[in-house]
Image (tube, rainbow, N blue to C red):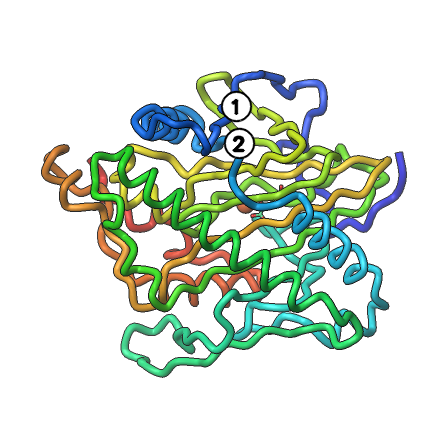
Amino acid sequence: MGEINSAYILSTEHRPNFSSFIKVDKIPIIDLSQTSQENLISDIGKACEEWGFFHIINHGVSSDLINKVANETKKFFQLSMEEKKKLRRDAVNATGYHDSEHTNLTKDWKEVYDCLINEGIQYPCTDDPNDLELWTLKNHWPQSLPHFRETIAEYGEKLEKLSFKLLELISLSLGLSGDKFFDCFENQLSLVRLNYYPPCPSPDLALGIGPHKDPCVLTIVAQDDTGGLQVKNNSVGGWVPIEPIPGALVVNVGDVFQVWSNDKYDSAIHRAVVNSQKERYSYPFFFFPGHDVMVKPAEELVSEQGLAKYKPYNFGKYYSNRTRHDFNKEKVAGKEIHDFKISD
Ligand SMILES: O=C(O)CCC(=O)C(=O)O
Ligand SMILES: [Fe+2]
C-alpha cells in the first residue's frame, strides 16, 4: 500500500470496501431509438423509480465527438500545474480548474474542469434573499489548446439537446406534460465537467468523489472504459458498480427532479472509486435550471398524493449557498434538498 496525503484519507466507516461491491446486471439499458414511445416512457419511469440511474444507447451523440472530448481532456490535464492554476475556480465563478474538491469535508482524489454552456449567464452574488445583485459568469478557456473550446462547446450543445429529450420523457413518465418544465431552462446554469482521476496508491483509503447526490435536474455522463462509478441502492443492500458499456451514456436523476416528482423519483447517492493501476476520465453534463426558478413539487402530483413533500426554494440562492460553502469547505444548512423537506 502506498502513501497518500492525509487530506484524502477517509474515516474508517466511509472507506470503500472492495470486497463488498454488489455486481448486478440489472442497471437498466434504455434504447432511445425504440419505436414504441409508450414502452420507452414506461421503461424510463421504471428505471427512475427503481434505480435513479440508467444507461442510454442510440442517443445520437457520436463516438467521434466523445473521442474528441477525451483527447482534449487528456491534453488539458497534462498542462503544467502553473498553467492549470491560471484557470482556477474561485468563490464566485464556480467554473475552471479545481484540484481540491471536497465531498463531506474529505478531499477527492481527482482534478476537474467545469465550464458553463451559456457563458455570460447571471447568477446571485450571495445567498442573502434580500441581495438582488447578480454576477455575470464566465468560463476560463486554456489558450494553449486551439481545439479545446470548440470541442467542449459542441459536446455541451449535443448534451443539452439530449437533456431536453430526457426531460420530456421523464416528465411524461410522471404523467405530466412533456414540456412542463421547459421554461425553467431559459437562464440555465448547465455545466460540462471534465473529471480526471489519477491512479491512487491507496484506493481503499480515498475516493475519486465521495457519496453525494447531484443538485441538478438530471446528469448525463460519458465515461472511459476504466470503471469506478457506483450507485448506492438500498434494495440490493449496498454499492453497485455502473460498469461502462461501450457507446452508452449514463443518466441519473438529480435533486431538482426528486423535488419536482414529489419523491416519486429519487436522486440516487453515488460515488467514484479509484484504482492503483489506471487513470480514469469522465465527462458529465449537469442540466441546471436558471437562477430565477422556484423549485417545488409539481402541483399535479401534489393533488394526486394529497401533500407537497418540499417547501419551495429559489434555485439561484440555494446554489449560491452551496457553491460558496463548498468552496470554503464549510458544512451549513440549506445545502441539501432534505433541508427543504416537509416532514410527513
Ligand atoms: O466520474 C463519474 O463517473 C461521476 C462523477 C460525479 O458523480 C460528479 O462529478 O458529480
Ligand atoms: Fe455526481
Q: Quadrant of residue 150?
A: bottom right
- Is residue 81 toward the left or the right of residue 65 in the image? right
Please tell me the numbered disc located at residue 286: none
Residue 194 vs 150, above or below: the answer is above
Residue 95 picture location, percent across and down: 58, 68
Quarter of the picture holding the C terminus? top left
Mark 1 or 2: in front is 2
Q: Quadrant of residue 177?
A: top left
* Disc 2 CB within 8 Å of nearest ligand 1 atom: no
Residue 326 picture location, percent across and down: 54, 60
- Crowd around label 2: few <14 · some 14–19 · many ≥20 (10 Å): many
Q: Quadrant of ligand 2?
A: top right
233 or 122, nearer to the observer: 122
- Is residue 308 toward the left or the right of residue 135 in the image? left
- Residue topped by disc 2: 55
* Disc 1 CB within 8 Å of nearest ligand 1 atom: no
Residue 234 vs 92, above or below: the answer is above
Q: Identify the residue at horizontal 66%, vertical 55% (top origin).
A: 194
Q: Identify the residue at horizontal 39%, vertical 75% (top origin).
A: 124
Q: Which of marks 2 and 1 precedes in the sequence?
A: 1
Q: Residue furthest front?
A: 35
Kind of residue at disc 2: His
- Crowd around label 1: few <14 · some 14–19 · many ≥20 (10 Å): many
Q: Identify the residue at horizontal 57%, vertical 16% (top origin).
A: 25
Q: Is there a contact, CB below 8 Å, between mark 1 and mark 2?
A: yes
Kind of residue at disc 1: Ile
- Residue topped by disc 1: 27
Residue at disc 1, secondary structure: loop
Residue 246 vs 96, above or below: the answer is above
Q: Quadrant of residue 302?
A: top left
270 or 220, nearer to the observer: 220
Residue 180 picture location, percent across and down: 23, 50
